[in-house]
Amino acid sequence: MARPTLKPGTHGNIAYTHHGGRVEATAYARGLDEVRRRIKASGPTEDAARKALVAKIDVHNADVVGSRLTRATTVAELGLIWLFSLRGLSAGSMESYGREVKRFITPELGGLPIEAVSPERLEAFLGNRPGAAGRVSRVVLRGMFELAVKAGALPRTPVPDSHLVSATPARRTITRVEYQRLLTQISVWQEEETAGGERSKDLHDQVILLLATGVGKVPEMLAASWEDFDLTGMIPVWTIMGTVERSTERGLHVRRYTPSEVSKIKLPGPAAHMLYRRSAALGTLRQGLVFPSRTGGPVDPANWRRTLTAAAGDDFQGLHLTALSGAPARV
């Protein structure tokens, strides 16, 4: 029986060959240019080799489609081109955007030519993805169609402005009075008895480090290790060395920054005193993450934000907690 013909943009069965500590994945793929090719890629494991192979095929297809981006290009093809244009983003961001394109946008809108996509059609799609999922959808769709406009394939983006405004809430610093009131509220919340067991006692200190320093990025605060702090000098310093990310391959993990991403910040009094107190309480056990989860790994930033929302109470709902007024800048 003859083998079925591969459709453009698909690949056949993957074969694996082991060479020492490496694995080579090989498959025949028919690109969007309808040419059948034998593609190879390698990695430390079969799963890594497979992902490298699929990525290599996607890159080739994006190049092909990108060379012929027109009004007739489909939403699925535009999504592929856009993802390819993002090379260099963090693994977590790429995985989040790729999942949105392949699992949600392409099944619902993928077959439409981009010239046929109206604001009303996108409003209907976005209406079925409320909350955080909808915000990711809006960001991805906005990026995709802005790329089409930039390439001259469309005169304007069809992504509804009304949704984009709500997707990016206004940010402001909080006053020192609000800061003290928030810490008090969190302290009360931490001590309340619950049927589910004892609440974490870290939230109060985490908010101090986040707001007093003005870091503003929850994943960086949760990735902080004791080794990142110099508490011995006249001016204590925090070297921000990493961030918490999630990927299919590694799950929730701390990604350590490259030298160009590393930054330093002088620790103001409240943050320094909090760290001195925690350090003294731990003694010789002071190592690893400053705020580990109950299992010893990093805390999920999404779970942390939900916890803060529950603890902060109604007075702080909708306030984007980026920094305390007068917090120091990175150096």
Image: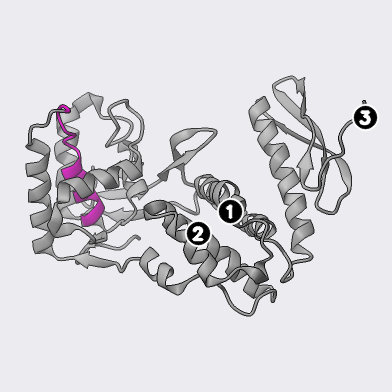
**Residue drawn at (44%, 54%), measured in percent from left and top?**
129
**Residue drawn at (19%, 50%), measured in percent from left and top?**
208
- Mark number, residue 11: none
Per the image, label 2 sits on a secondary structure element best described as helix
| Mark 3 residue type | Ala
Question: Horizontal placement of 137 versus 145: left or right?
Answer: left
Quickly name the residue at label 2: 125
Of labels 2 and 1, earlier in sequence is 1
Could you say which is closer to the camera, residue 225 or residue 250?
250
Q: Are marks 2 and 3 in contact (CB under 8 Å)?
A: no
Where does the magenta region start and end? 196-211
Quickly name the residue at label 3: 2
Of labels 2 and 3, earlier in sequence is 3
Q: How is the image coloured?
A: one colour
- Mark number, residue 108: 1
C-alpha gap between disc 2 and disc 3: 41 Å
